[in-house]
Image: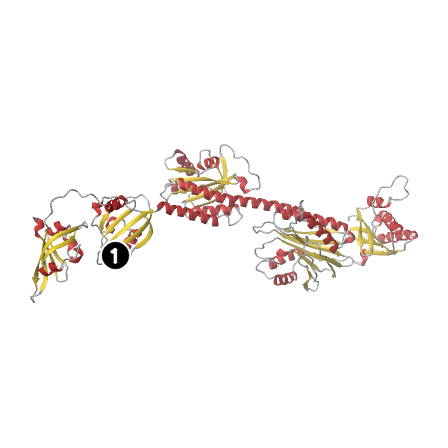
Amino acid sequence: MEQASATAVINARGIVTGWSDGARTLTGYPAEEAVGRSVAALLAEPPSTTALAALAGPLVLRHRDGTPLSLTVRACPVLGADGAPDGYVITAEPLAAPAPAPAAVPTLAEQAFQQASMSLSVFDTEQRYLRLNGVACRVMGVPEDVLIGRFFPESVEDAEHSHSFLNNLRLVAETGRPVRYNSWAGAPALNREHAWSIEMWPLKDDSGEVTGVALSAIDSTEQYLAQQRLALLNEAAAGIGTTLDVVRTAEELVEILVPRYADFASVDLLPWVLGADEPPPTPDGEIVLRRVAHGSVIEGAPDAAVHLGQADVYPPSSPPVRALREGRAVRGQAGEPDFARWVEERNARFPEGSSYRKGVHSMIAVPLRARGTTLGVAVGVRVANPEDYAADDAVLAEELASRAAVCIDNARRFARERSTALALQHSLLPRDLPGQAAVEVAHRYLPSGSLAGIGGDWFDVIPLSGSRVALVVGDVVGHGIPSSATMGRLCTAVRTLADVDLPPDELLTHLDDLVTHLATDDTGDEVAELGATCLYAVYDPVSRRLTMAAAGHPPPAVVLPDGTASLVPMTAGPPLGVGGLPFESVELELPEGAVVALYTDGLIEDRDRDIDHATAELCRALTTSAESLDALCDEVLKAVMPEEPSDDVALLLVRTRALGADRVATWDIEPDPAHVAGARQAATEQLTAWGLDEEAFVTELVVSELVTNAIRYGEPPIQLRLIRDSALICEVSDGSSTSPHLRRAHAYDEGGRGLLLVAQLTQRWGSRQTGSGKTIWAEQPLPTD
């Protein structure tokens, strides 16, 4: 038999140098695989010492298929030139086969190996297949006998994951240590890549020598994809909604989707979302959507059929409209009629991008819904990604869309509240400040762009009697509509109290009481969050005195005509709403042309700024040479305001003027009715000097009535003063603090008609308390030139 003549030749180093065809038939190794190998690598068991000594005996080889092969061998030495053995010729024949036995029943271990749910394989130390179970064969796509004895790289594609697998096989064979790692790779019999958890461990004989490598590969694709979906959701939670901007939030959703979830993604919103309107009912039939964001794996998104900012009409059968109406994710696959119509419609609308849509095979449209309101739709498309959108992908898309929709709705609500608060604030702030002879005014108001919203800063310029003017600047704690509403109430209260003509410290005391009442709800509980700061100042152009008091507000800065600038040294009282503490007034005499800067803390305060440095910058900026007071406002803001102010900024600049002696006339009146005629005569002569003879008749009546009342009901000293400003002002002061009251006299009353007559003849009239009594005043309009 051919097996009986199996012959091999080995040299003195144990390397096979010859291999007969009988040896091939007997062992399964062809000559090209056997020659050059160490004979020890062919042994399944080391030979016995008896057989080595006798150069004959039993020997166990390992067949090429990995099974042990028992043989009887005989070695014949080949002598060299020196007479010493230079090699051996070995002949072998199989042991006598035992009598046929019944087919062996597979052992429990063999059954476990073959029926395991994971892929199990065994390799020799040269990375050749020795065994595979059924799962491994299905993964490889071929039966076991095709792979036995083959070198691993011959059975797989030349790819990075294959090189990594081979390197790990070699590492285990060389080091004898197990290896465990994860891989994302394909397999010959699988149509897509899978996630594998691979473990390799060495197989050792009794002496501890590595004889092979076993491995298990568990398909963990579902767990891997679940982890990827969870990671995407976590990233979306951190990456979507970083700003309260509708468009930016939509862009953040697209950035999350592309490229891991979609090769192209878009976000289209219903038009009302970008405005300030309430959500209308979803119309039947076609729906108009506006594109606010899109992204693609191709730079520039040339596959987009709708441009950013463009409105598009979607037919009822389109996936986006179906998603809006059904309130759930709608999937489409290549081959479906609706999907084909959708692609055709896109190609017809934007044929330039049709080449990029040739490979589109799956799409998903998911509605953006928040708080029961539909805002728009997000669309994802797959081209390069071979996987169609599945049910799990729809669940993920709905979760992502839900999170994004809440952020978009928050941004929409913030934009609407900001717009409302800004409109409310602008309606309450003075638009055109009235012309004043006392001061020249310029102002700036910059609402905050922070996420906290619009604050409650305000300013005002209020004309007072006697050509005086009140200057107000304040700041309400908080942001948004409540802060703006509180600001409006305080602004109105200040104007009301200013009309009473209270001194600054008394006015702030009354305003403090008002804030305390506003901060107390119906149950009487204190609301600590409600509070405000305020600075109230009164400038008299006749005396050139500026009287001011502050409630927790920064002091004003004053620039004198010589160019020196400084903060007004004053004690700022507690903020409004604290209660129980007094406010102190400060009085300054200012030269004509001095500039007073009133501002809110947003101009100088910031988390990263030193307030002393900021106020020094303010004083330096106020001394800048500017063409006008209005230009000086811009210079101050440019030099002092933070780059990104976190609060509103209000700035009010006032340049003082003075009424000279040529525009004011004053007379002391004796408390005797006989001097009333003299007062009338003096007033008439002064009007003639001013060229206001046309006003003499009314002025005589006003002076007569006011002086008579002061003599009859007041107390000395009595003083008459005429002021020629934008109006003609008549003032009569006396030492009594009792204020007059306007009443309607009956038919037979002898008096009571004086103040009624004054009210009818003049533009406005009133009274104010002074330190020594009261002043009754009346204003008449001057004729226009």
Q: Which residue occupies the extreme top position in the image?
A: 284
* Pick the front one: 380 or 559: 380
Q: Where in the figure is residue 590, as x and y percent of width and height? A: 74, 61
* Pick the front one: 760 or 742: 742
What residue do we see at 8% from left, 61% from top?
Answer: 77
Please indicate whether residue 397 sits to the left or right of residue 124 in the image: right
Crowding at mark 1 (Cα within 10 Å: few <14, some 14-19, many 20+): many
Residue that mark 1 sits on: 173
Within the image, what quadrant is residue 386 found in? top left
Please indicate whether residue 188 sits to the left or right of residue 478 in the image: left
Res. 292 in view:
no
Q: Where in the figure is residue 109, as x and y percent of width and height? A: 24, 47
Q: Which residue occupies the extreme right position in the image?
A: 674
Q: Where in the figure is residue 778, as x and y percent of width and height? A: 81, 49
Q: Where in the figure is residue 664, as x and y percent of width and height? A: 81, 56
* Pick the front one: 594 or 235: 235
Identify the image's colour scheme: rainbow, by chain, secondary structure or one colour.
secondary structure
* Pick the front one: 504 or 689: 504
What residue do we see at 23% from left, 52% from top?
Answer: 123
- Report helix, strand or loop for mark 1: helix
Res. 230 in view:
yes
Please indicate whether residue 594 sits to the left or right of residue 253 in the image: right
Q: Which amino acid, mark 1?
A: Ala
Task: Please state the total of marks drawn on the protein image.
Answer: 1
Within the image, what quadrant is residue 343 found in? top left
